[in-house]
Image (cartoon, rainbow, N blue to C red):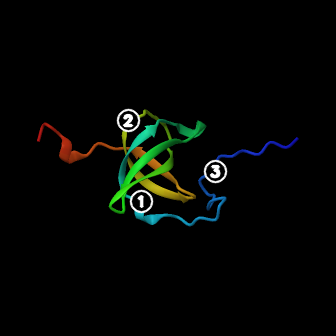
Amino acid sequence: MEHRSTSQHHDDKGAAGMARDDAVIGCTGELLIGTRGPAGPGEVLVRVRGGSEAFLAWSDEPLARGRTVLVVESRGSRQVDVIAWADPLDDPAG
């Protein structure tokens, strides 16, 4: 029996044929489910289009639930690449 992975790879344009969502690139969000780095995605709630939308979130390294992240790429099919983010305007030392 052939095993087929349900995860999407970075160069995949989306199994459902959904195009990249460039509107989310550069937006911040909060991880609802932590990412596992290359082992699997988490889920991020992104502030975009005057509201919040959930996306599968991929990262190079594991990121914990509740972490603020920055969307750096859209994979299509409601999947994004994220990195850890700390807003410099929130720095209490300023």
Looking at the image, do the residues carrying marks 1 and 3 touch, with CB atoms under 8 Å apart? no
Q: Residues within 10 Å of mark 2 (few under 14, many from 20)?
A: few
Q: Can you say which quadrant of the picture contains the C terminus?
A: top left
Expressed as whole percent of the image width and height from the top left, the position of residue 73 reads 47, 57
In the image as oriented, which residue stretches furthest toward the left?
Answer: 94
Q: Is residue 3 left or right of residue 70?
A: right
The mark lying in front, picked from 2 and 3, is 2
User: Which residue is denoted by mark 2 in the rendering?
Assistant: 66
User: Which residue is denoted by mark 1 in the rendering?
Assistant: 24
Q: Is residue 37 left or right of residue 72?
A: right
For marks 1 and 3, give the CA distance: 18 Å
For marks 2 and 1, give the CA distance: 19 Å
Q: Is residue 71 left or right of residue 2?
A: left
Mark 2 or mark 3, which has the lower sequence index? 3
Looking at the image, do the residues carrying marks 2 and 3 touch, with CB atoms under 8 Å apart? no
For marks 2 and 3, give the CA distance: 23 Å
Viewer-proximal residue among 45 and 21: 45
Q: Amino acid at mark 3?
A: Gln
User: Which residue is denoted by mark 3 in the rendering?
Assistant: 8
Mark 2 or mark 1, which has the lower sequence index? 1
